[in-house]
Amino acid sequence: MMPGAFPARLEDRHMVQIAAIEAVLFHRPLDQTTLQQLVAGAAFRGFVMLAQDEATVLAHALFLNAGEDADLVSVATAPSVQRQGIAAQLLHHAFGALASESVQRIVLEVAVDNLAAIHLYRAQGFSEVGRRARYYSRPGGSVDALIMARELAGAAA
Ligand SMILES: CC(C)(COP(=O)(O)OP(=O)(O)OC[C@H]1O[C@@H](n2cnc3c(N)ncnc32)[C@H](O)[C@@H]1OP(=O)(O)O)[C@@H](O)C(=O)NCCC(=O)NCCS
């Protein structure tokens, strides 16, 4: 883990940096307008990992809380700080917070060719519960999505 990095609730002041991280990492990134709409919804729950300066966003994890289930809408770590355990720590923190408001299960979709994310989710206790054909578009065609889920029982810290 990066020294001094810590998880926090997403705030409006983080939005520009989140949109920038999305833009470098995703084929179809959440832009600032879409992010604003997402964040304004009652079901939205957002978490960030901040650097020691308390201003630099290193990673974000965005959820929609649908009651017993919460959907992981997006998780991403800035390229320069990947593979240091930041996403793992951020998700662990977020799952604890969601469990404490009675969320019982996290559900997500991930492209079958996104091996880094699939490894991350497996390491976090997710397993495959379904598949959606040709769910993500790619420059050369489309790829399937895996639907993965994880029970949160006991995740509240
Ligand atoms: C997936 C992603 C969020 C992981 O973030 P990260 O902060 O680098 O992840 P961590 O360092 O916490 O990794 C935790 C575990 O995930 C797995 N993992 C992460 N990156 C990996 C990679 N490039 N290759 C293989 N496994 C990987 C490993 O099991 C890792 O544990 P280990 O380092 O002890 O082996 C990051 O690669 C990313 O932002 N990717 C682009 C955005 C994206 O695809 N998000 C998911 C959309 S569904």
Image: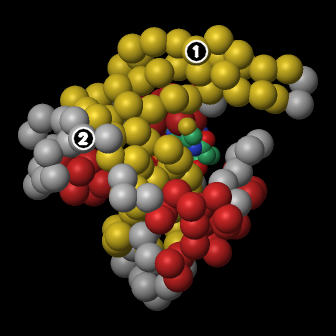
Q: Residue at x 22, y 56 (%)?
A: 97
> Is ligand 1 within 8 Å of the beta carbon of the residue shown at mark 1?
no
Q: Are marks 1 and 2 in contact (CB under 8 Å)?
A: no
Q: Residue at x 47, y 65 (%)?
A: 40
| Dot 1: element | strand
Q: What's the residue type where badge 1 is placed? A: Arg
Quadrant assignment for the N terminus: bottom left
> Does 28 sit left or right of 59 as displayed?
right
Is disc 2 surrounded by few (<14), some (14 to 19) or many (20+) residues within 10 Å?
Answer: few
Judging depth in this view, the residue of 53 and 152 nearest the camera is 152
Q: How many marks?
A: 2
Quadrant assignment for the C terminus: bottom left
- Height in image: 137 above or below 62? above
The residue wearing badge 2 is 67
- Height in image: 30 above or below 110? below
Residue 2 drawn at (x, y percent): 43, 68
Q: Is residue 49 visible?
A: no
Please tell me the numbered disc located at residue 8. none
Of mark 1 and mark 2, the one earlier in the sequence is 2
Judging depth in this view, the residue of 20 and 114 nearest the camera is 20
Question: Marks 1 and 2, Cα distance to the nearest angstrom?
Answer: 23 Å
| Dot 2: element | loop
Judging depth in this view, the residue of 80 and 10 nearest the camera is 10
Is disc 1 surrounded by few (<14), some (14 to 19) or many (20+) residues within 10 Å?
Answer: some
- Height in image: 98 above or below 105? below
Q: What's the residue type where badge 2 is placed? A: Gly
Task: Report the mark closest to the observer, 1 or 2.
Answer: 2
Q: Residue at x 58, y 72 (%)?
A: 15
Please tell me the numbered disc located at residue 132. 1
Q: Residue at x 22, y 36 (%)?
A: 68
Q: Looking at the rendering, which quadrant does residue 44 occupy? A: bottom left
Residue 12 drawn at (x, y percent): 50, 78
